């Protein structure tokens, strides 16, 4: 669920960004049904997840969260890392501010809308309307995203508790 990090690591290639964004929604060999650029993004998404899931900092973060959040600790850790990237975005991207970066990505999703999986088509306009990528930069925006996740995924993701852990 670390959308911002996946998109950021895609550079400026629109199809690579979209593929990386939808990577969690395309299983198995279904990536072969997409244009080459989106295929590359889906495969990049999988590589990023493999790398991240084995990284000592990520593992340590998940273990710190596990007593409170159980199997959802990885999702919350992903979102924490998106918050850290968004809240100091200019440190990592000197040429484009977060708001413009987000707007460019939203345009990429509209241009490639027909390639978005049905589940993504179901939420992408709300995602854009609420400017979710930019909202990751503050506690309120992150909490809002966690509330949406808790509504669709499980009540085990307690947004308020998640934010209090991050603040500590």
Image: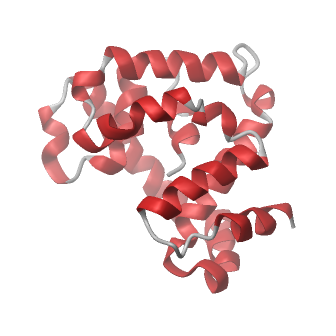
Residue under the point 30% across and 34% down: 121
Q: Quadrant of residue 130?
A: top right
Quadrant for the C terminus, please: bottom right
Query: Height in image: 70 above or below 58?
Result: below
Is residue 59 rendered to the left or right of residue 49?
right
Counting from the top left corner in percent of width and height, residue 97 is at 73, 19
Q: Name, please, the residue furthest toward the bottom.
A: 67
Q: Is residue 106 above or below residue 22?
A: above
Question: Please, which residue is most extreme toward the right here?
Answer: 168
Q: At 27% from the left edge and 32% from the top edge, which residue is drawn?
A: 116
Residue 40 appears in the rendering: yes
| Image side of residue 71 versus residue 35, left or right | right
Q: Which one is in front, 111 or 28? A: 111
Based on the displayed image, in which of its 4 quarters is residue 146 positioned?
bottom right
Residue plotted at (57% across, 38% down) = 4
The location of residue 94, given as percent across then percent down, is 76, 18
Q: Coloring scheme of the render?
A: secondary structure
Identity of the residue drawn at 43% across and 28% down: 17
Residue 166 lies, in percent from the top left, at 78, 62
Residue 55 shows in this picture:
no
Q: Is residue 30 left or right of residue 81?
A: left
Q: Where residue 16 sits in the image (x, y, percent)? A: 38, 26
Using the image, determine if residue 3 lies above or below residue 165: above
Is 152 positioned to the left or the right of 147 in the image? Answer: left
The number of callouts visible is: 0
């Amino acid at each position: 669920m670390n959308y911002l990090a996946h998109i950021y690591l895609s550079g400026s290639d629109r199809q690579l960004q979209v593929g990386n964004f939808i990577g969690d929604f395309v299983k198995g060999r279904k990536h072969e049904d997409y244009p080459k650029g989106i295929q590359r993004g889906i495969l990049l998404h999988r590589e990023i997840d493999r790398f991240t899931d084995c990284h000592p900092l990520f593992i340590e973060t998940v273990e710190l969260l596990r007593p409170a959040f159980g199997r959802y600790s990885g999702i919350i850790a992903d979102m924490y890392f998106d918050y850290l990237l968004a809240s100091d975005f200019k440190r990592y991207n000197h040429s484009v501010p977060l708001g413009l970066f987000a707007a460019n990505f939203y345009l990429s999703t509209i241009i490639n809308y027909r390639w978005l999986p049905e589940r993504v088509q179901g939420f992408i306009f709300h995602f854009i309307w609420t400017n979710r990528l930019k909202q990751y930069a503050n506690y309120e925006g992150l909490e809002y995203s966690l509330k949406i996740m808790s509504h669709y995924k499980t009540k085990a993701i307690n947004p308020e508790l998640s934010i209090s852990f991050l603040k500590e």
